[in-house]
């Protein structure tokens, strides 16, 4: 089974579970499985059209799925999928 | 009102890192745990500021560093609980940019660095409405 790692800011939507295992064979199906089990996480990851939000990145291993095959990126049973929030900031207001 | 405890060893790591990177902003992850509504920050781990361009006023964390940080937490039975960064020649108060980029749940520690010396250190958490930072300490 592929394993999704849930970033800590989103674990309140997954009953504090850090990981989610899925039999899905593509990234898109894995995200669908996750949002079906934990519906409240859906708006944090997907937009109204069911597409992955622009500020959320999905990585398979150390590769961004946008550089592979997007939602159709295949998963192997031992694949680690990471949901990666954008983290940035700084002292200047502008 | 948040109840957050901050380990002194973590504070030393943050201050040392902030002074080393001056005049640029430093950045790193915070690890710890939460029990009965009480948060303990027990570890700070420096990482590279991946912001391209001027790092004196901005920081970024690369996706790969974020992935490694979550995996570190899983393998060390701890929780990725926040992010620290420095404000060179600026106060330890979140900027509008910090507010815009922040995530709920995380503790955001900011240390001011004035002329190369670390100064005031504070910690903040974004409210659930994502519009206000509330001070932890």
Image: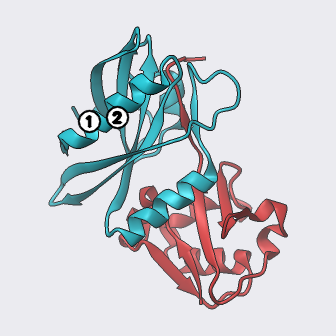
Chain colours: A red, B cyan
Q: Residues within 10 Å of mark 2 (few under 14, many from 20)?
A: many
Q: Residues within 10 Å of mark 1 (few under 14, many from 20)?
A: some
Look at the picture and state if B39 lies above or below A83: above
Total labels drawn:
2
Q: Pinpoint residue A86: horizontal percent, then vertical percent.
A: 59, 46
* Residue drawn where x is 44% and y is 33% of the image: B131
Q: Is residue A38 visible?
A: yes
* Residue drawn where x is 55% and y is 17% of the image: A93
Left or right: where B68 falls relative to B112: right
The N terminus of chain A - image quarter: bottom right
Q: Pinpoint residue A43: horizontal percent, then vertical percent.
A: 58, 59
Q: Secondary structure at mark 2?
A: helix
Using the image, tell me which numbered label, if any, was put on residue B11.
Answer: 1
- Callouts 1 and 2 close, C-beta under 8 Å: yes
The C terminus of chain A - image quarter: top right
Q: Mark 1 to mark 2: distance in Å? A: 5 Å
Q: Secondary structure at mark 1?
A: helix
The residue closer to the viewer here, A61 or A70, is: A61
Q: Pinpoint residue A28: horizontal percent, then vertical percent.
A: 72, 75
Q: Quadrant of residue A17?
A: bottom left
What residue is shown with label 2? B14
In the rendered image, residues at marks 1 and 2 fall on the same chain? yes
Look at the picture and state if B114 lies above or below A7: above
Q: Quadrant of residue A52?
A: bottom right
Left or right: where A3 falls relative to B116: right
The residue closer to the viewer here, A86 or B9, is: B9
The chain identifier of the residue carrying mark 2 reads B
* Residue drawn where x is 24% and y is 35% of the image: B136
Using the image, tell me which numbered label, if any, was put on residue B69.
Answer: none
Q: Pinpoint residue B13: horizontal percent, then vertical percent.
A: 32, 37
């Amino acid at each position: 089974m592929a394993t999704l790692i849930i970033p800590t800011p989103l674990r309140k939507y997954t009953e504090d579970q850090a990981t989610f295992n899925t039999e899905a064979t593509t990234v898109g199906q894995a995200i669908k499985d996750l949002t079906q089990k934990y519906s409240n996480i859906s708006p944090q990851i997907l937009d109204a059209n069911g597409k992955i939000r622009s500020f959320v990145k999905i990585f398979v291993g150390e590769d961004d799925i946008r550089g592979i095959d997007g939602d159709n990126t295949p998963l192997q049973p031992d694949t680690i999928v990471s949901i990666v929030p954008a983290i940035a900031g700084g002292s200047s207001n502008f | 009102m948040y109840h957050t405890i901050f380990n002194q060893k973590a504070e030393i790591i943050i201050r040392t890192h902030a002074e080393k990177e001056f005049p640029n902003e430093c950045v790193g992850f915070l690890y710890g745990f939460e029990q009965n509504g009480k948060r303990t920050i027990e570890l700070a781990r420096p990482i590279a500021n991946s912001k391209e361009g001027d790092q004196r006023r901005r920081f970024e964390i690369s996706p790969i560093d974020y992935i490694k940080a979550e995996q570190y937490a899983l393998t060390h039975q701890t929780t990725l609980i926040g992010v620290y960064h420095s404000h060179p020649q600026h106060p330890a108060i979140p900027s509008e940019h910090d507010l815009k980029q922040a995530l709920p749940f995380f503790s955001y520690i900011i240390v001011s660095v004035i002329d190369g010396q670390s100064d005031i250190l504070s910690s903040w958490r974004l409210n659930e409405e994502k519009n206000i930072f509330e001070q932890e300490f």
